[in-house]
């Protein structure tokens, strides 16, 4: 599948993959800083952002989509960064195409199967009837009983856009993402990756637990784990300066 992407900067390619329910716009601030050093490519994964929709949403699908962009742009020696779902896409890509990567950065996601924990978000999204709702405020009000966090509501509502005057639409394929959630949460294959890899987690997040690290390190022997205090799952947004320092220290050494 041909994905939507945008580029900024010049030099060694640095590809960024957003997480579930996000899109490339979420990473624009970081991309501008990274563009002082790299050719940054921000990708909308399938069923997100400005990219096309499909019924299937496996990590092999998403790794294949990324390979298509890399071939189109003739990229090599890539630094690949992915957050959450994008981190699993990045790890799967590294398993399948290690020869294309220079370094890998995985943000707050492990290799294991995760329990279903998006029910409230999906219920909140499905509560928004776009045939009835006329404003973003009405959409947020419909979501409120299901999604208590104002920050999460605003993150999700960034996916709403005006399809035409008076008509709101989603930039994400909620039906496919809901149906494919077991695949999205599923464990990665046990293929060893020798690419130098940095894992970054938030201390307030439970996505990478201390007891997960041994299994991660077995698949990624050349890896390090860094923890940012006072940050949760959206560690790059909650602690941007600390996050960028870790990324640049790893990439520029």
Image: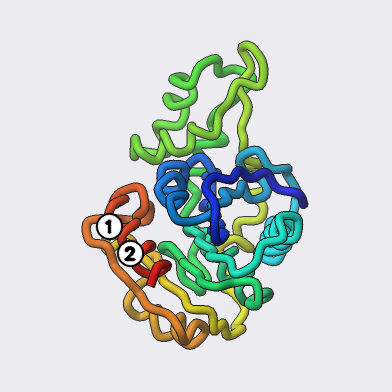
Marker disc for residue 246:
2
In depth, the one of 9 and 65 nearer the eye is 9
- Label 2's element? helix
Up-down relation of residue 38 to residue 136 (above or below): below
Instruction: Write down the residue under mark 1.
Output: 242
Residue placed at 51% from the left, 72% from the top?
103
Q: Is residue 198 visible?
A: yes
Say how the picture is coloured: rainbow
Residue 137, x across and y down, in percent: 44, 20
Q: Is residue 4 left or right of residue 8?
A: right
Residue 124, x across and y down, in percent: 49, 37
Q: Are marks 1 and 2 in contact (CB under 8 Å)?
A: yes
Query: For the residues marked 1 and 2, what is the alpha-carbon distance in whole angstroms?
Result: 6 Å
Q: Quadrant of the C terminus?
A: bottom left
Residue placed at 59% from the left, 74% from the top?
188
- Label 1's element? helix
Marker disc for residue 39:
none
């Amino acid at each position: 599948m041909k994905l939507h992407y945008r580029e900024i900067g010049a030099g060694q390619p640095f590809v960024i993959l957003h997480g579930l329910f996000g899109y490339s716009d979420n990473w624009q601030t970081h991309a501008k800083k990274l563009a002082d050093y790299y050719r940054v490519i921000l990708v909308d994964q399938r069923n997100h952002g400005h990219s096309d929709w499909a019924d299937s949403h496996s990590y092999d699908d998403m790794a294949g989509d990324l390979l298509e962009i890399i071939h189109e742009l003739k990229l090599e020696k890539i630094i690949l960064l992915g957050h959450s779902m994008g981190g699993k896409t990045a790890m799967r890509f590294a398993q399948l195409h290690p020869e294309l990567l220079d370094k890998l950065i995985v943000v707050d996601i492990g290799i294991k199967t995760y329990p279903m924990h998006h029910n409230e978000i999906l219920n909140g999204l499905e509560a928004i009837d776009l045939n009835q709702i006329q404003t973003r405020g009405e959409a947020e009000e419909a979501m409120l009983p299901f999604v208590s966090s104002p920050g999460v509501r605003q993150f999700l509502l960034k996916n709403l856009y005006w399809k035409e005057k008076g008509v709101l639409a989603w930039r994400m394929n909620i039906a496919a993402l809901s149906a494919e959630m077991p695949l999205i949460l599923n464990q990665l294959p046990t293929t060893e990756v020798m690419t130098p890899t940095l894992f970054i987690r938030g201390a307030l997040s439970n996505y990478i637990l201390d007891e997960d690290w041994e299994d991660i390190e077995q698949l990624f022997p050349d890896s390090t784990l860094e923890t940012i205090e006072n940050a949760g799952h959206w560690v790059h947004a909650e602690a941007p300066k600390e996050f960028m320092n870790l990324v640049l220290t790893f990439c520029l050494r």
